[in-house]
Amino acid sequence: EEDNRSASDKALDLLEEEKKSMTPLEQLERSLLWKVEGNDFFKRGELFKAADCYYHAIVFARDLTKNPQHYPEMKHTSQEMTKAKELCESVFTNLALVQLKYGCSLSPENSERCKVLEEGAKSASQALKLNAKNVKALYRRAATNAVLAKTNKTN
């Protein structure tokens, strides 16, 4: 039977499969490596590669943000949950910056601009769900919403 899923869906399935054979600590380490690589790409202005790394980082850490008492089958500790939450918060905040920067680089007439900026606001909101006092995430969501409002006003 032919597999008609998108390339990104297939890639995600491969990551999920890889994750199954890893301990929670290995997942956290892999997530951190992806985050560091994403930061390096961002510093070089390679926004798509940075975003891709940040998505990978989130895939490896997000399940570990769940309470171990409610998910004993995941075999992670409360310390690992805390680390995963901190990591995801940081990565979502970085992703919001990438999306804001890329969205602002597109012309206001480009239909992709609003979509990218809306994703940026969502990324910042995800970080804020993990820590409502994250000043960078608050600022990035506000900045993204301001650009969105201006874009919608001119179109």
Image (tube, rainbow, N blue to C red):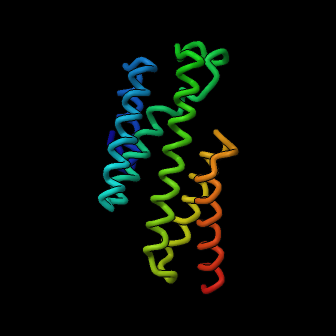
Work out whether residue 61 can be spotted: yes
Percent x, y for residue 99?
Answer: 48, 61
> Residue at the spot x=44%, y=67% of the render?
102
The quadrant the C terminus occupies is bottom right
Quarter of the rendering containing residue 147: bottom right
x, y percentage for residue 62? 53, 34
Q: Is 153 on the left-hand or right-hand side of 50?
A: right
Q: Is residue 99 left or right of residue 42?
A: right
Q: Quadrant of residue 47?
A: bottom left
Q: Residue at x 43, y 45 (%)?
A: 55
Q: Answer above or below: position of 64 versus 89.
A: above
Can you give x and y, in whole percent of width and height, for residue 27 in the image? 41, 26
Q: Residue at x 52, y 30 (%)?
A: 84
Q: Quadrant of the N terminus?
A: top left
Displayed quadrant of residue 25: top left
Please identify the residue farthest to the right as the structure is shown: 132
Count of numbered labels shown in the rendering = 0
The answer to whether any part of residue 4 appears in the image is no
For the residue pair 70 and 28, the one nearer the viewer reads as: 28
Vertical relation: 47 (above or below) 59:
below
Give residue 67's position: percent from left, percent from top.
64, 22
Question: From what the image shows, is residue 19 above or below residue 56?
Answer: above
As drawn, the residue found furthest toward the front would be 135
Please give the name of the residue rendered at 49% of the width and 58% of the height, measured from the top-left corner.
97
149 left or right of 100 in image: right
